[in-house]
Image (cartoon, rainbow, N blue to C red):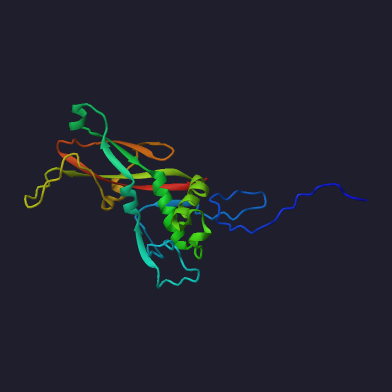
Amino acid sequence: MKNDLIITRFKSEPIIGTKSYYEPRTFFGSKMINVENTIIIDEKTIQYSEINDNTNNNGYQYYNDIYENEKIYLIDLIDIKNNNHTIVLSPQSDMDKITNTNWTINIQWRNILKEYLFYKIKEKRVFKGIKYNDVLGNNINLYIKNYIDKNILNRYELNTINFYVEYKTLDDGDFNKKSNLQYNPKFDVNIKNQDNLIKNANSIIFENNVELNYKQTKTSKLYKFDYYFVLNFIRI
């Protein structure tokens, strides 16, 4: 008996798994990256190596851990935090400004976390052996950053901020040194200790940043302050 059904014929071709940024979760499991339960962005350093020859090979890491042609990088988490936050005077009266000055610290927590994850992935050589023509956009490092955006960032939330403050007199009493400048707070890891921890700092967490509001407890007529912060993330 003749079969009149028309069957469409499909041709199957293998597709490289890195040709998509997004890793869908399925009932039977997927190849999602195993991530840390907690992340502390403090003052550690991250070391990694990769090819950097101003060609499309930029970002490539050898599969067999052959480092002689790879450039070594040392990343300081302090620098990442320093480059991703601002501190400004809050709107306030002239009287408040010269007495208990109000400050607003805007921390781009999402950028900080993304950079940390990127450098940790490079350190662990998760994408070693992946060539530029194996990924979307023919750019290995850009692909990794987009992969983090699509698959890892939303698995974390900012849990706590450890905020440290240390006051310094405007006139340090040593005439051979320059006096501290008024309204000139400095980001300084050296003040990090338990005595300088501020336990009641007011913070508001937004989608990409956190706004931390701080009122000086010592008058700006006599004191300035230096500050530092540590970010703590948890997996959700």
Residue 54 in the image, given as x and y percentages of width and height:
37, 62
The residue sitting at 51% across, 54% down in the picture is 136
Residue 85 in the image, given as x and y percentages of width and height:
32, 44
Decide which of 157, 1 is in the foreground and name it: 1
Residue 235 in the image, given as x and y percentages of width and height:
50, 48
Residue 53 in the image, given as x and y percentages of width and height:
38, 65
User: Left or right of 175: which side holds 16?
Assistant: right
User: Left or right of 220: which side holds 22?
Assistant: right
User: Left or right of 51: which side holds 63?
Assistant: right
The number of callouts visible is 0
Residue farthest to the right, as pictured: 1
| Occupied quadrant, residue 167 | top left
The residue sitting at 39% across, 40% down in the picture is 209
